[in-house]
Amino acid sequence: MDLNNTTKTVLVTGGSRGIGAAISLELGTQKFNVIVNYNTKVDEANAIVDQIKKQGGNAIAIQANIAIPEESERLFREIETAYGQVDILVNNAGITRDKSFRKMQKTEWDEVINTNLSSAYNTSQLAIHKMIEQKYGRIINISSVIGQSGGFGQTNYAAAKAGLIGFSKSLALETAKYGITVNCICPGFIKTEMVAAMPTEVLASIVAKIPAASLGSPSDIAKGVAFLIDAPYITGQCLNINGGLYM
């Protein structure tokens, strides 16, 4: 594929659904080369790629379970073949395994920590060296309001998302001198399949606590990502997009 040398490549992990899909589509309209990473939902990933291409953008879908280091390494090898290095990394992949802590199994803890936090280590470690060499890079980690406030039955999820915040601040300190920014976005409750699966009465009680009196849209988060990509003097920060739920 003949691409303009100034075209930057962005990897969106978990980029086929929900917030990740919105991020992929938003960046696709801005003429980035978009890598839509997915684990199991190949049809949804291909649909996002098709939408980006119909809008005149460049995108490919690549399967990889980025919680596994070897699969992350394969992902980056395939990206290098297709587009070269990753200029912008959006660590969005995440799952929930909600359960009160006293009933939580070690496997439920490990799965959430590995997918939501350790995966960011895997991908960032593979991306950061080329970013340092070229004196440019953006790493945007999708955390959560739950990582700031905690959540009942979510000790695993809250720990992983809070970990992303500390990870971002520390990595930002190490890389700012190389023209790399590292930031977090902390979404509140967003209209996704994950939120839709919550019991109706629980969701209603949450909305009642949001000053904006509504759930957010995945596109709200996608616009936040685009903003941080274009903000070279913002690093080590958390952009809270939550309708005022947590201030």
Image: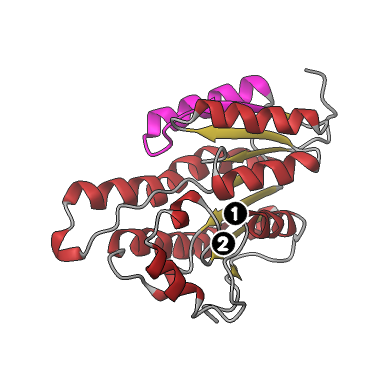
Residue 184, numbered circle? 2
Q: Nearer the viewer, residue 184 or 204?
A: 204
Task: Give the residue drawn at x 80%, y 35%.
Answer: 7
Task: Give the residue drawn at x 34%, y 63%.
Answer: 159
Alpha carbons under labels 1 and 2: distance apart: 6 Å
Q: Say whether marks 1 and 2 touch (CB < 8 Å).
A: yes
Location of residue 211 by image quarter: bottom right
Residues in magenta, as a range: 59-82
On whether residue 203 falls in the magenta region, the answer is no
Looking at the rendered structure, the kind of residue marked 2 is Cys
Q: Which residue is mark 1?
A: 140
Task: Give the residue drawn at x 64%, y 47%.
Answer: 22
Location of residue 134 by image quarter: top right
Q: Nearer the viewer, residue 203 or 194?
A: 203
Looking at the rendered structure, the kind of residue marked 1 is Ile
Residue 220, numbered circle? none
Residue 67 as seen in the image, left or right of residue 218: left
Residue 62, how many percent across, how many down?
55, 26
- In the image, residue 223 sits, relative to residue 22, either above or below, namely below
Residue 85 shows up from this direction: no
Residue 83, how many percent across, how many down?
69, 26
As drawn, the residue found furthest toward the front would be 200
As drawn, the residue found furthest toward the left would be 102
Residue 110 shows up from this direction: yes
Residue 213 as seen in the image, left or right of residue 234: left
- In the image, residue 235 sits, relative to residue 6, either above or below, namely below
